Structure formats: C-alpha cells, structure tokens
Image (cartoon, helix red, strand yellow):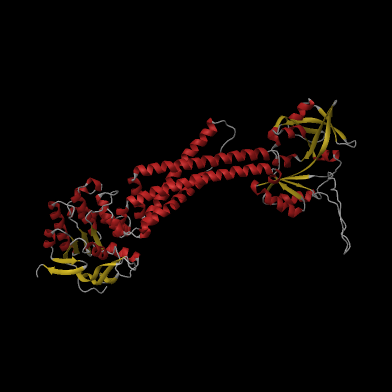
Amino acid sequence: MWIERTLAVRFLREGRIQSVLILVGIAVGVAVIVFLSALITGLQHNIIDRTLGTQAHIRVESPDEVNRVLSPAAGVVQLILESRRAQRLRSINNWQQVRDALDVLPEVTAVSPIISGPAFVRRGAAVESVALVGIDVDRYTRIIPLRDDIIAGQLRVGAGDAVIGNQLAHDLGVTLGDKLRLDAGEGRESVVNITGIFELGVRELDARYVYLDMKQAQSLLNLPGAATVIDVTVKDIFGADQVASRIARLTGLKAESWMQSNKQLMNALDSQRISTQMISFFVALSVALGIASVLFVSVIQRTREIGILRAMGITRRQMLWVFLLQGGVFGLAGSVLGGLVGIGLVWAFNNLGPKLFYIPVTPTLLLATSLLATITGVIAAAVPARRAARMDPVQAIRNV
Amino acid sequence: MSEPAGEVLRLQGLCKSYNVGLATEVEVLHGLDMSLARSDFTALVGASGSGKSTLLNLIGLLDTLTAGELFLLGEPTRNMDDARRTALRGSAIGFVFQFHHLIPAFSALENVLMPLMIATGKPTAADTDLARSLLAEVGMEAFADRKTDQLSGGQQQRVAIARALIAHPALLLADEPTGNLDSRSSEDVFALFRRFNEKFGCAVLLVTHDERISSACDRMVTLDDGRIVADTHKGD
C-alpha cells in the first residue's frame, strides 16, 4: 500500500490549487452538517428536557372500566346500545407489587406511585379547583426534580403540610406558613400548612398542583392505601414506547409513554429531524459530486502518467487505490477542517448568540462526521478511480 | 524457463489486428517471426505506419496479440492474465519513450526508483544507492533531487534511461529515444544504451528514424507494411 499512498499524496500536493479549493468546499459542507446536527440536537434536548421536567416518561394507570355484556345464547342476534361508564377514581390493584415488579426492570430508572384526584381549596371567599397529588417524596423527586423548582420554603409534605405552585399562591394571596382549607367533597376536609412553593414553569401546573403526603391524599380522596398512578422513568427516553407496551403486557394495566401523550411534540421533533437529515444528505451529495469531478479532471490530466506507471508494472488494482485514497484523504482532511469550523460556529452560538439554549458538540458527532466524510470521499472517487484503472496503457502513452 | 541460451524474446507468426470481428477489421502485423538474444543491440526501422510502434507495444506487453505467440524469457504471453502480464512487464522490461514520461510530482531520484517502489514498496538504502549510481552512470548525479520540470529534454531522457534500467530488465525497449533531442544529446544517449547493453547484458531494441543511429546498431530489422523485409547483422 506504500506506493499507492505515496502516489496519492504526491498527486494531491501537485494539484495544489485544485486540492485546496475542493478541501475548502468539503470543509464548508462538513461545518454546515456539524453545526446543523448539533443545533438540532441541542434544540430537541432542550424541548424534551422542558417537557419531561414536569412529567414522567411512562404513566401507568388502571385500565378503563367497561360494561360487561352477557354473551347471547347460540342463534340469537343481539343489538347493544351502550353508554360508556363514568370512570371513577380508583386504586391500581396491588400497586405495591406492581411497583416492586417495575423496580427490577432493567430499562427502568425510577418508579413512583402517586395518588391524585380533584379538590377545592378555600381561603376566605376565594375558591380554586386543584389537583391533589399525594407523593412519596424520595421516589417522586427521582422522576421530577421538584426540589430544584422550589422557590420558597422546602419540599416537605407530611402530616398537615402541603407544597403548592406559585401561581396558586398568587391567586389566593397566600405565602409560606399560611394555612389552606382543602375540600375533596362529601364533607372530607382538611387544613394544611404551606411549607413550600414551587415553580415548574408551566402555568397550568403551577396553578393546580397541591403536593401532599400520600396518606393525607388517600384519606382526603377516600381511597385508603391507594395509588392511582405509577410514574416511571426509563434509561432511553426514545425507547419509552417499547417499555410502556412491555409494562402493559406484564401488568395488564394501561401504560402510556410520554411520546403517546405528546404526539404533537413528537411530530414536530420528527419533522425537524427529517428536514435536518435531508439538508445534510444534499450537502453531502454535493460534496461527493465535487470530489468526484475534481478527481475526474485529475485522471484526465494524468492520463500519460497513468500510462507510464502501468508500463512500469503498476497493476490496475494499485491504480484504483491511488485515486480511492485521494478521495479518502479529501474526505478526512476536509472533515477535520470542517469539524473545527463547526466547533467554532457552535462556540460562537453558545457564547455570543442569544443563549436560548446550549448546543452540545459530542466527540461521537465529530467522529461520525469524519468517518462519513471519509467514506463519502472514497465512494465519490470510485468512478474516476475505475476509469484510471481501466485506462489502456498504449492509448495513455500515445495521447501525449 | 526453457529458453535457448541467451534468448530473451521470440516471436512466432505474430499477428495483430484492430477492430477484430467488425467490418472495419484490419490486420497491421502479418505473421512476424523473430528472436532477440541477450547481447543483441537492435534497431527497428521502417516508414511511418509500417507497424513499428505497434510491434514495440506488443513486445512490451502493453498490448495483446491477435494470433501467433510471443515468448518473453521463454514464457508464452498470449493468454496471460493482466496481473501476470503487469508483473512480468515490471520485472523483465524497461521502457524509454520519445517524450521520456517522467512523473512530475517526483524528483529525478524518485523517478528512477519508481519501478522498484511499485514492485516492493518503500525503497531501501540499497535501492537508493543503486539509483544514485545509475544517475551517476548517466551523468545526472548532481540533479538527483531536482523536480523533473527543472531538467532539460536531454537530462530528462537520461533520467528515463536510468529508470528503465533500475529493475535489471532483460530487455530494454526504446521508442524514438533520440527523436526529440539535438544531435549532441542524441549521441550521448545512444552511447548510454551501448554501454548498458555491454555492462548489464540486457538486450536493446530501438525504434528509430535516425539513420546514423540505426547504422550504428549491431543488427537492423526493417519493417514494411507489417512484414519483416530485412534483418541484417553488421558483420553480414
């Protein structure tokens, strides 16, 4: 391979201006791909982080209650006019066992049973409807980093303590240490201390959620010992769908992944990803065509040299490699250059730009881009290289 | 290899046609018989279009024959595959062309080393010494590290001769090696061929239009319209 490499490098160096121009072209293409990929990755992570900052990856609930219809006797046609049953608040059967079973699933990183139901809060004449959420603090904070969102007081639920959102506090004019009256209907009432105020950044949640101890929520909602939802997080967020269906099969419960409950968002992310890939593909294609045309010109220019090299005993295969290597060198050198420019662009965006979100550049992205560019270069060189390899030495030498 | 003592090349009824199988098929060489010995110093002469260059390309294994057989160092070559032909060409034949055909991306020394680099890769110190001594033989020692476009036509041709000899070929083929040079350089180059024929014992076959050159050769093969019409030795 030594002579092929040497010839390739010398040919590249000799055609200096051509080589430099195409290298700049490849570098620009690679820089665009690197920057665009990093930008979209950063943007998507940002959006997903925000979305999943307030919800679990998978929500496990009891299946809907349905009417049971007796099957008719043989030979009888049965027409049914059915109205769906109202779904009452009820506990997941044997939720402790379900929790323990989910705890040991390898894809799962955290499991948090909660009990949640509707109530009113009163203060003086003001009434607000809220969602009571009874949590096990340790488990819950592994799913939603609520501690980071506390803006006053602390995350402490327990006998008679509650943590509410800043919007609700604002609407009711309450602050830390004040008392609230919770009314879950049918005479079940309780007075709680406000020990913490959180801000999740989603107005609806900040105005509705009231975090309580599980026990207190259970007694308010009249479901002693119950859990209505089990929240789950998984290692690979984009694998949540599969894990959800696995959990559904395993437990017979209803398991909904964040992708199912955020279909619009997924759609937007997918379209973004596809358009990025399209742009990258076409940039790569034009880079490949650039490499191919430069090497084509080079093969024609070197017709005589190829002839004399063949006369001196270089084989067709060796000649093929001389030009394939040139394509590979173009791809590799161009991608290293382009990678640096891409990193520069990302740095500028992160440090000088609008700072809306952070763009990460991973070594994997750079490595993958270089590899892809090198392979693209070799593939682009294939046609001119074949032409060089097939050249008839007699013709080549005669065509001075 | 079962070659008769000292025989490098033998042609048996060698024919070459172009456009084989087409209506325009034309035979340019008609059943040539000839052999070259190791000590031969031969001129191949003939009018333009008589088939000299075609014959030279066939002998150099750059082209394939249509009928007959061509033995190089006793090996029949007509049905050889391309890889084997290329290898044999690299090891047994040295080429010198009218337009010298050096590779401009390399220095004079590297051009001389090229056949060895193709055959075995990175040159050893011994290879480089050999190349330098060959450059010294052709009087180009001082120009070893020059790029070839900094050399005159005569100097380039000397480098090309050194290159043709480095792999110790059994046969040196030269197509109008002096055609592009002034008479002074022509004589120098011819003298070099002479010297290497004697020193390395490689057969030399020169295609030339120059009568002074051809008459100075030991043997003269005359081609006319694709046939050998005369084959004279100097002593005859």
Q: Pick whichever, A294 or A323, lies toward us.
A: A294
Q: Is residue B177 left or right of residue A130?
A: left
Give the side of residue A135 with respect to residue A184, left or right: left
Q: Residue A112 sits in which quadrant?
A: top right
Q: Quadrant of residue A336?
A: top left
Is A244 in front, or is B187? B187
- In percent of width and height, residue B114 lies at 28, 55
- The residue sitting at 16% across, 66% down in the picture is B222
Horizontal side of A219 relative to B236 (left or right) equals: right
Residue lying farthest to the left in this orientation: B235
Q: Nearer the viewer, residue B91 or A392?
A: A392
Q: Is residue A236 visible?
A: no
A122 displayed left or right of B127: right
Quarter holding the N terminus of chain B? bottom left
Residue A79 x/y as whole percent: 86, 56
Relative to A33, does residue B37 appear above or below in the rendering?
below
Residue at the limit of the structure toward the front, as seen here: B23
Q: Give the position of the C terminus of chain B as an image quadrant.
A: bottom left
Looking at the picture, does residue B79 appear above or below residue A367? below
Residue B55: x percent and y percent?
A: 24, 65
**Residue positioned most to the right:** A187
For the image, the number of numbered tags is: 0
At 73% across and 50% down in the image, what residue appears? Answer: A102
Q: Is residue B44 above or below residue A8?
A: below
